[in-house]
Image (cartoon, helix red, strand yellow):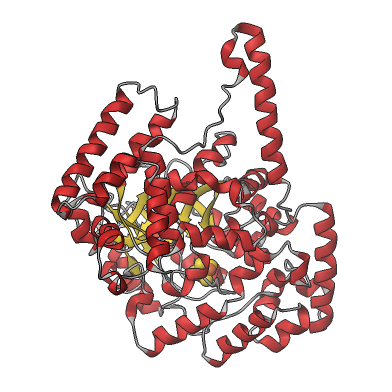
Amino acid sequence: MKKESVRNRLNEILNQAPDLKRIFLSADSIQSKKIKIRKFLSGMLMATFEDNPTIPPLEWVLTRDAIGVFRTILSSRSERLAGFSFLKYINSLLNNPDFDSLPRPRAGFFAELEHLIRGVVGKTGIYPEKIPAFTKYEGRKAAKLRSSELSRMAATTRKFIDRYPSGLDKNIIRKRSFNKARVLKYFGATELEWEQWKWHTRHIIRDVGTLSELIKLTPEEYQAVQLARQYKIPFGITPYYLSLMDYSPEEGNDLGVRAQVIPSLHYIEQMNRMRDSKECSMDFMLERDTSPIEGITRRYPNIVILKPIVTCPQICVYCQRNWEIEDVHSPHAAMTRDKLHKAVEWIADTPEINEVLITGGDPLLLSNANLERLLARLAQIKHVERIRIGTRMLVTLPQRITDSLIRAINHYHHPGRREIMIVTHFENSYEITPQAMGAVQKFRRYGIDVYNQLVYTVFNSRKFEASALRLKLRLIGVTPYYTFNTKGKEETDDFRVPIARLLQEQKEEARLLPGSVRTDEIVFNVPGLGKNYLRATQHHDIISILPDGCRMYEFHPWEKKLELVDTYIYTDVSIHEYLKKLKSLGERRANYKTIWYYY
Ligand code: SF4
């Protein structure tokens, strides 16, 4: 963008706030501009609390929030933490003759600035001009009008939710039976073999030749899978999960299913680059720094993660443990008996630990006997009151949930003494099938609860998409538990969703569901620190907006009032770029217009 165009655009934005524009264009020093902008913001803030008639009702909340963000961004502390001064940057773009030495502002930067200023001056325009009719009446008349208004809202919600088919829909069940027949024919297998989980693990699809004979791939998918094999990047899909994919990507329903296991070229290139340069940033969660003994991760006072096996029957592209998963269903991935024994002894010697999350990898890849041996040993430890089993097998291979497995697990589930719970990972409603429901119900029949952790990615973040999943999960007996922000791992950039979208989804979509359905908490699993509750604004701050339109956040540790622990600085993805991705998936930007006002 040329100098004149940049300046014209900035002037256009600042026209929303003439006082602010005057300050920016004055010949004052940067320090004096900062002081004047602060005064201006304080004045605006006071006005919001004084019932300013120029700010429409309800807008004042947005104004208060936007002013808070602007003030934080201006602070010297934020500038130091971000290593960037938002104020100096805008000032230089407007007034500095040395314009060419500055990084060019991207469209996302202008969009952020424009919405921030609109927020500050109470001109977001997100509320309709007309006040709802029911507010003018009382009693039955008001109730009837309100009821019609709520029906209209419910109908809109339903229209969105109906866009996302589930694997329980009759036509999808029929489609899947054809898919299954195609897979069975390809492998020359029988219906009986299909029901045996070990048949599936013996026939995991690991190469592009087999995959492209079973489903139609886009040229990019083909190339990425081919390169995955060449670069030895873990890749694999179970025949069952493959049967959830439509034959052709043009059918348009299985995007979320494909994207989870078929990597993008960007992912393959990044993974290859990082492995070559031996960067350990792949361990984004800094598990190496939170592991007191091999196989154990500890981030909380009472809970530990135990990883008896670090492989899975198929590989999720965005897996946070991709740094330690060597291959799909790898024969060398289980801990040796000796090491596992030492890890369990460490738990036995640490009386503060009340809860053990057995994960990996997928621990249900262990044989029943090995799993039962581990559960039996943990059950002998008096201070372990809860054992969580983290598994995706209900989604990737529900045939694994056999009656004998359930009996082995149930044996250690003693109400009042020790709870065993299952935590699984459905990503979208298309994954919910009669087989998956059957697997969930087997656990539920024995009183074992099943919870879901959703990783919120571009491929399940469309309007009401997560709501469609939550509703179906509850119907099959799964309780939504956590919704995770995607990690800031470079190789998974294609998946990342801005934090503002998680907040928007909670307020504008999840909120419309009954409380018994929207039971999940939105969190950012902060590297080295653990879960940060995104809904709690006091747990994070925006400290800058960068020239590429990305927001920078400072995350506070969960134990900040208890211990002195450092904060974590995080660069989010640009909202503008995210909206562009949604548009390429056929979404209307207008449906997401309030996203800018979530911080
Ligand atoms: S199931 Fe979990 S551990 Fe396994 S690949 Fe997927 S995200 Fe990673």
* Residue 381, image x, y percentages: 34, 57
Quarter the N terminus occupies: bottom left
Front residue (pair 312, 581): 581
Q: Please give the name of the residue rendered at 51% of the width and 78% of the height, measured from the top-left corner.
A: 267
Q: Is residue 26 left or right of residue 258?
A: left
* Residue 65, image x, y percentages: 35, 38
Q: Is residue 400 visible?
A: no
* Residue 95, image x, y percentages: 26, 60
Q: Is residue 55 visible?
A: yes
* Residue 416, image x, y percentages: 44, 40
Q: Is residue 135 above or below residue 170?
A: above
Q: Please give the name of the residue rendered at 19% of the width and 46% of the height, measured from the top-left corner.
A: 562
Quadrant in the rendering for residue 50? top left
Q: Is residue 155 left or right of residue 343?
A: right
Front residue (pair 121, 593): 121
Front residue (pair 324, 399): 324
Marks counted in the figure total 0
Q: Is residue 575 left or right of residue 429?
A: left
Front residue (pair 190, 289): 289
Q: Is residue 287 above or below residue 413?
A: below
Q: Residue furthest bottom?
A: 230
